[in-house]
Image (cartoon, rainbow, N blue to C red):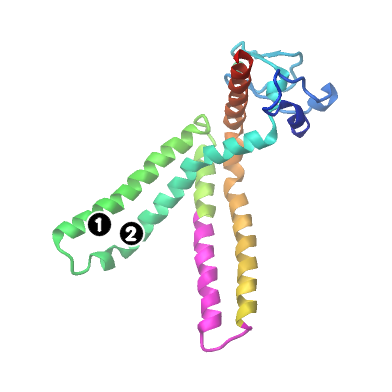
Amino acid sequence: MEQASHDSQPGSDSAPSPAIRPAELADQEFYCLECGYNLRGLTGDPIRCPECGRENPLWLLTVPAPIISRQFAVLETSSAYSVLMLLLFLVSCVLFPWLTAGLGKASIARIAIVTCAFLGGAIVSLHQSRATTDNHPAWPLAIFRYHFFGILLFVGFFAELALASWATLGPRRVLPIAWTWLITLIVIVLQTRWLYRAAIRDLRAIQRNMAVRIAARELDRWFSKKKRQ
Ligand SMILES: [Zn+2]
């Protein structure tokens, strides 16, 4: 996909010809722009989808990777919201007795409503997240994985901060303060990267079809508009 990026990026006037030699296309995965059907092994330009009949021009199928990455980020938003809402719900539940201690009935009801709203937000986001995978059967497991590692990422972050604070402010100082915070920073960065990759692995795999489809449609619209002008 990378090879096509020089020619297919918005900026040139006409639909560019792919800069990819046919031999390099042989093992590439292509998906129909209309229905997402896997066009692997099919030849010709355009490639006619056996599922829905859409003629898929080759240059559009080789959508540049950065445009697909942007779609991945958009598609991930609902899943990320779900993790955030669920975390807020859990924290509200745990802190509920402290938050409501000594308050009147009306205030307790307000806090309870906000707590329920977090759960409601998580449910709506989950519903949207499922749609970003075309209701893929592997979605429940993928979204569970995303939440598991996502929550671990947050917990890990605060655990590292707490540990570093304890190491620098506690009675026994093991390392100089600057060293402690430098090591903490490195651990947080590595830990976050690893946990994030683990979180998105399965979700990305089942969002791929839709990400490529939306990215290709976006390019298609862009070039059609450009041609009409
Ligand atoms: Zn199709």
Q: Position of residue 215 (x, y in %)?
A: 60, 29
Per the image, label 2 sits on a secondary structure element best described as helix
Q: Position of residue 53 (x, y in %)?
A: 61, 10
Magenta residues, as a range? 151-176
The reply to whether the residue tagged 1 has its Cβ within 8 angstroms of ligand 1 is no
Front residue of 153/223: it is 223
Check disc 1 and give the amino acid type.
Answer: Ile
**Considering only vertical position in the picture, is 163 above or below 108?**
below
Q: Which residue is mark 2?
A: 92
Per the image, label 1 sits on a secondary structure element best described as helix
Distance in Å between CA atoms under marks 1 and 2: 9 Å
Front residue of 10/149: it is 10
Q: Is residue 17 found inside the magenta-colored segment of the image? A: no
Front residue of 48/189: it is 189
Pointer 1 with pointer 2, Cβ within 8 A:
yes
Q: Which residue is mark 1?
A: 111
**Considering only vertical position in the picture, is 96 above or below 205?**
below
